[in-house]
Image: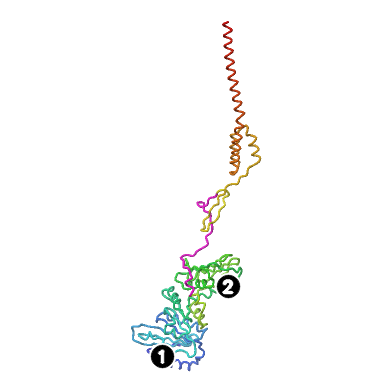
Amino acid sequence: MIIDLPSTTTSQVNSKLVRLREEGGAVTLGRVLTLVIVTDDGTKTEEAIDAANDASREHPCRVIVVARGARKAAPRLDAQIRVGGDAGASEVIVLRLYGELANEGASCVVPLLLPDTPVVAWWPNEAPAVPAQDPIGQLAQRRITDAAAEKNPIRALEQRRVGYTPGDTDLAWTRLTLWRAMLASAFDLPPHEKVTEAEVSGESDSPSTDLLAAWLAGCLRVPVKRVKAARGEGIVDVRLERRSGVVELSRPDGKVGTLTQAGQPERRVALQRRQVRDCLAEELRRLDPDEVYEAALRSLGKVVRGRTPTKPAAATRKPAQAKADGDGTATASPDGKVEAKAEKPDVKADPKADAKVDARVDDKPAKTSAAASKSAAPKSAAVKSDTAKTAAPKAAAPKAAAAKAASGKSAAGKAAGRTGAKSAKAKAGS
């Protein structure tokens, strides 16, 4: 049931609520808290009310919607009361404020608060820089914002970090519950090794991706890189480097995730993007400060921002860069390039070859020297070269002597011929 009260006052709204309670039998004691929604009057107002109605089925409460209208209009308060099927398990009071009254939302909310129940303030869209200093924020024990719904999500997240007050929380953090649970459960499986570095990829304007990277940096105390994903919405991929391998949780389609871990089979897990009503219901379960969220905000400065995801480069052999000499052994350098180790061949001298060389020294000294130099190792080449030089003169000596003897015989023959001719002439003359 929906009841409109145009140009009314908070006293008239309260009186109408009492009459409805008496007629319908709704008991105020059934409400566990008061949820105040602060937003601008427009199409998104109904979306916030629907989310609150769904969350109220788990947390019966009174929902007060402060919808700020045109500031230039005449001061006016238009109220609307929703009970029964139009209000879920709660009662909804919509206050549309115009003119100067739009800045006096806290004054209109105070008369409608449930007595002795906690107050939770929620800004579904644009939120103040410091929610705890807002007039409505000062009335609440818990203050819920949503950085992802603002025009500049990353800048809004930085404002949450600077102006954090115990009791603040953000739905960008609540959307990480399933991711944090899956990553924490991955460490329950062996091998139980320490993470050396991590990388989180997602949309460039995803505050949840920044918070997840900050949470990992604070808990693991390792370098965490935050990069922009090439495709996908929200958080896309998380990689944790360990000595045994990589632990990777990937969700490229925004619905189903894949958990990959060294030594374990690949697992498919439910990681669908959470709706606002689910996140709101989770935040209403606790009214105490969220220390883990506070620690994640403080660790935002430890996150290293990058551009593209990094993948481990495989060592590949490139013909232009690898030089294979000797045995052609190639090794990968730290930068991923392959370098070839050139080793000189280790040639051992053959004893039989040495024997053949020694046997042929007397006959063919020049060829023997060449054969010895080719078959010998580089280290023994100099020694055998000296041996060849020493053997060469010995081998050349017999040939030189034979040549001299031959030349002597020829000279003697010529001399004898000349003497015989002279003696013959002498006899003829006599």
Q: Is residue 159 above or below residue 24?
A: above
Question: Which quadrant holds the C terminus?
Answer: top right
Depth check, mark 2 against mark 1: the one in front is 2
Q: Give the left or right position of residue 419, taking residue 17 as reference.
A: right
The answer to which of 197 and 87 lies nearer the viewer is: 197
- Look at the image and give the residue range highlighted in magenta: 298-324
Label 1 Cα neighbours within 10 Å, binned few <14 / some 14-19 / many ≥20: some
Q: Tell me where residue 3 appears, x and y as whole percent.
A: 43, 89
The answer to which of 374 and 73 lies nearer the viewer is: 374
Q: Is residue 200 above or below residue 358?
A: below
| Picture disc at residue 213 | none
Name the N-terminal-most of marks 2 and 1: 1
Is residue 415 on the magenta stretch? no
Mostly what secondary structure, the magenta segment?
Answer: loop
Instruction: Name the amino acid, label 2.
Output: Ser
Tag 1, which secondary structure?
Answer: helix
**Residue visible at 39% across and 83% down in the picture:** 68
Q: Tell me where residue 118 appears, x and y as whole percent.
A: 49, 87
Its colouring scheme is rainbow
Q: Is residue 418 above or below residue 430?
A: below
Is residue 312 on the magenta stretch? yes
Residue 228: tell me if it is visible: no
Q: Which residue is mark 2?
A: 185
Q: Tell me where residue 323 appears, x and y as whole percent.
A: 53, 50
The answer to which of 172 and 9 lies nearer the viewer is: 172
| Picture disc at residue 10 | 1
Q: Tell me where residue 336 appears, x and y as whole percent.
A: 52, 58
Label 2 Cα neighbours within 10 Å, binned few <14 / some 14-19 / many ≥20: few
Tag 2, which secondary structure?
Answer: helix
Instruction: Name the amino acid, label 1.
Output: Thr
Q: Give the left or right position of residue 290, taking residue 75 as reference.
A: right
